[in-house]
Image: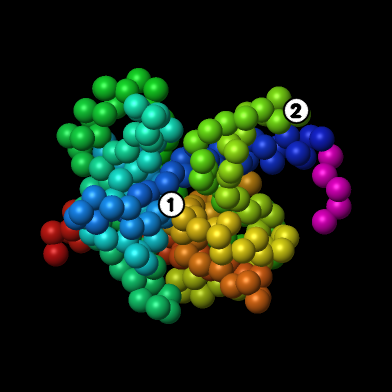
């Protein structure tokens, strides 16, 4: 990849900023109140929905005990919102998906209570990734402290991201993306599962579910070929 121009660098900053606005961390807790892990996800809100749908990866996701981490600090701690009750689909081969309806009463209460809360929702259709394209990426903030870089951009002290991903293979449920740089190690990607992978315009194709250091490929569960609406969600939850 050739050296980036100043304008291209600015565009990348803007893309990362856009991705982190609707990608959030999800904390998972057990019945004893102990943190058992983290993943990532986003809120999906088609025009006919009043309350967003929480979408994330299925592996390791409990039906209950998950909370959305907001960017609000309260009494020195990250303020969290109940993410609802998840419906989980997962096998070790090609299904890795979970969703919940954000609890309506809690959602309204928290929005009214905290004017600074930022729960940006994705409202567009999911798109099919195209083989050969190199414009895909994801970004999730893993630390809610911010600093300014030399160009004046406000950036998180730690943001897990990958840009210039290239779709090299696709089957019914999985997109395989080739990294534009060296695999950063499992510790770097820890908690990134469930992050939405989008094109340069911000249109979501899939969610991150894993990576392979040997091949340098990331695996992502496709969202473009599943139906996700209020009616289908309600039916699935009440099965």
Q: Which quadrant does the C terminus fall into?
A: bottom left
- Secondary structure beneath label 2: loop
Whole-percent x and y of residue 215? 65, 75
Q: Residue at x 71, y 25 (%)?
A: 152
Whole-percent x and y of residue 139? 56, 47
Q: Nearer the viewer, residue 3 or 145?
A: 145
Q: Specify the label residue 40 is tagged with.
A: 1
Indicate whether residue 158 is drawn in magenta: no
Q: Specify the label residue 84 is tagged with.
A: none
Residue at the extreme bottom of the image, as rendered: 93
Magenta residues (range): 1-5
**Residue indicated by mark 2:** 151
Whether tag 1 and tag 2 are in contact, CB under 8 A, the answer is no
- Decide: few, some or many residues near mark 1? Use Cα within 10 Å; few <14, some 14-19, many ≥20: many
- Decide: few, some or many residues near mark 2? Use Cα within 10 Å; few <14, some 14-19, many ≥20: few
Where residue 96 sits, quadrant-wise, is bottom left
Can residue 202 be seen? no
């Amino acid at each position: 990849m050739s050296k980036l121009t100043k304008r291209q660098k600015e565009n990348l900053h803007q893309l990362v900023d856009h991705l982190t606005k609707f990608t959030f961390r999800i904390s998972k807790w057990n019945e004893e109140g102990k943190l058992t892990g983290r993943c990532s996800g986003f809120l999906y809100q088609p025009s006919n929905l009043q309350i967003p749908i929480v979408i994330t990866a299925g592996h390791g996701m409990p039906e209950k005990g998950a909370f959305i981490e907001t960017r609000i600090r309260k009494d020195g701690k990250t303020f969290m919102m109940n993410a609802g009750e998840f419906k989980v689909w997962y096998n070790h081969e090609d299904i890795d998906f979970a969703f919940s309806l954000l609890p309506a009463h809690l959602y309204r209460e928290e929005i009214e209570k905290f004017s600074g809360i930022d729960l940006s929702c994705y409202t567009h259709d999911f798109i099919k990734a195209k083989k050969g394209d190199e414009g895909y990426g994801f970004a999730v903030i893993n630390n809610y402290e911010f600093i300014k870089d030399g160009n004046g951009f406000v950036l998180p002290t730690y943001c897990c991201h990958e840009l210039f991903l290239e779709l090299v293979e696709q089957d019914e449920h999985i997109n395989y993306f080739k990294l534009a740089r060296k695999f950063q190690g499992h510790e770097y990607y820890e908690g990134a599962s469930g992050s939405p992978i989008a094109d340069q315009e911000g249109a979501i194709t899939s969610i991150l579910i894993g990576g392979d250091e040997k091949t340098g490929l990331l695996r992502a569960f496709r969202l473009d070929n599943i139906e996700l609406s209020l009616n289908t969600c309600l039916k699935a939850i009440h099965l």
